[in-house]
Image (cartoon, helix red, strand yellow):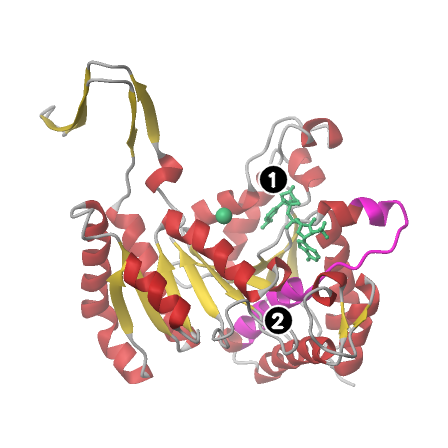
Amino acid sequence: MEKIKMTTPLVEMDGDEMTRVLWKWIKDILILPFVDLKTEYYDLGLKYRNETDDKVTFDSAEATKKYGVAVKCATITPNAARMPEYNLKEMWKSPNGTIRAILDGTVFRAPILVKGITSYIPTWTKPITIARHAYGDIYKNTELKVPADSKAELVYTDKDGKETRELIHNFTGDGIIQGIHNTDKSISSFARSCFNFALDTKQDIWFATKDTISKKYDHHFKDIFQEIFDSEYKTKFDEAGIEYFYTLIDDAVARVIRSDGGYIWACKNYDGDVMSDMVATAYGSLAMMTSVLVSPDGVYEYEAAHGTVQRHYYKYLKGEETSTNSVATIFAWSGAMRKRGELDNLPELVKFAERLEKATLQTIEDGVMTGDLYLLSNLDNKQKVDSETFLKEVAKRI
Ligand code: NAP
Ligand code: MG
């Protein structure tokens, strides 16, 4: 059989621990036999990040800007325990944070639905994609504890040195204050990424804030979204037959629960953080959640939403059998290949991506699955297999 040709390389970002093991197996078992794979390889494994003083992470993000599509393996974000484990020069920053800052993107997370695994919310029969604004608000805050008998004010100083101030609270007893911010540039990028992704995936997009209470801060998000939608996207949305819908966050939460899914829910930073955990859990498993970073100028980086599955890796190192779910990582590869195929006009590559996804779902629907899904599945003929057997079963079905 002749292998499927590619024209532009994918930016390949390798990673750590169990997902690094799966990464190689996915390529060897599911991709290389079928595709004449072209990638520009960046080793984001912690060992090499440390050797290059994290330069490799920056280079991989720049390459993503250049080529337009990347696929990323899960990576360790170092904490104190990793310092001696990897003999680190520094506690390097989260690669995802670095890449996100360079690409200025929005992260879209969507569950992979499969027969035999029922959502905790039975009406959710289609995926709900969460778009989380990944800049500012409480994630870049300034906080203070305030002693009794203090006056707290909000102050900004303009370029001429003129101060504008507003009373926060006159404290009679002890208390706390917090300053948060966002920028028009970041909110506009967020809005454009959301509208582009909605057009790309032909889904409605919902956006919600607490603008009734936060009449300037949250209301500003609402206004920016509406302005950009009206001036740049309304016609395109009409043509695509999709809708932009704004509502109050309370109303959105109620509607989401009653819905059957099949739309994108754009969330401010904190809402996206907590709501994506709720949505992922309700659909069943973190290992069945895909994640794609989309920049406002249309650059895509695909990955799984879960981490490096450290506990399984230590078992693997001891030579013990593992049953780690590779589905989200497979879908990161298929997502990246599909996008590359669309951009380069390679219908065979697009078809292969579809085939790979179908084969993966078919395997699980045939009852062959890893341990995490085995616990959730309601199929009678279910069977738990190890990490590598699962991939071989998928390969048979391609
Ligand atoms: P994790 O790797 O997502 O794993 C947490 C637990 O969830 C696992 O121990 C496992 O439960 C279950 N799990 C997650 N993915 C699974 C899969 N594919 N198949 C089967 N079970 C799965 O999160 P973590 O343990 O908190 O973090 C480990 C490392 O990953 C950390 O160094 C962290 O920095 C990094 N991380 C990276 C990313 C990223 O690169 N995007 C994201 C998050 C975390 P059981 O052990 O009960 O089987
Ligand atoms: Mg969270």
Q: Tell me the mark number nearer the camera, choosing from 2 and 1.
A: 1
Q: Is residue 265 above or below residue 142?
A: below
Q: Identify residue for label 2.
A: 334
The residue where tag 1 is placed is: 77
Q: Residue at x 84, y 68 (%)?
A: 389
Could you give the CA–CA distance between mark 2 and mark 1, rounded to whole angstroms?
25 Å
Which is more toward the observer, 124 or 27? 124
Height in image: 85 above or below 31?
above
Between 128 and 297, which is closer to the camera in this rendering? 128
The answer to whether mark 1 is within 8 Å of ligand 1 is yes
Say whether residue 229 is left or right of residue 368. Answer: left
Q: Percent x, y for residue 221?
A: 24, 53
Q: Outermost residue toward the right?
A: 319
**Residue lying at 49% horizontally and 72% vertically, measured from the top left:** 127
Magenta segment includes 340: yes
Badge 1 marks a residue whose secondary structure is loop
Q: Position of residue 146 (x, y in %)?
A: 28, 19
What residue type is disc 1 on? Thr
Q: Which image quadrant for residue 172?
A: top left
Which residue range is magenta in the image? 314-341
The secondary structure that most of the magenta stretch takes on is helix
Q: How many marks?
A: 2
Ligand 1 under 8 Å from disc 2 Cβ: no
| Residue drawn at point x = 28 percent, y = 78 percent | 236
Depth check: 377 or 272 in front? 377
How far across and how far down the image is residue 37, in percent? 69, 69
**First in sequence: mark 2 vs mark 1:** 1
Quarter holding the C terminus is: bottom right
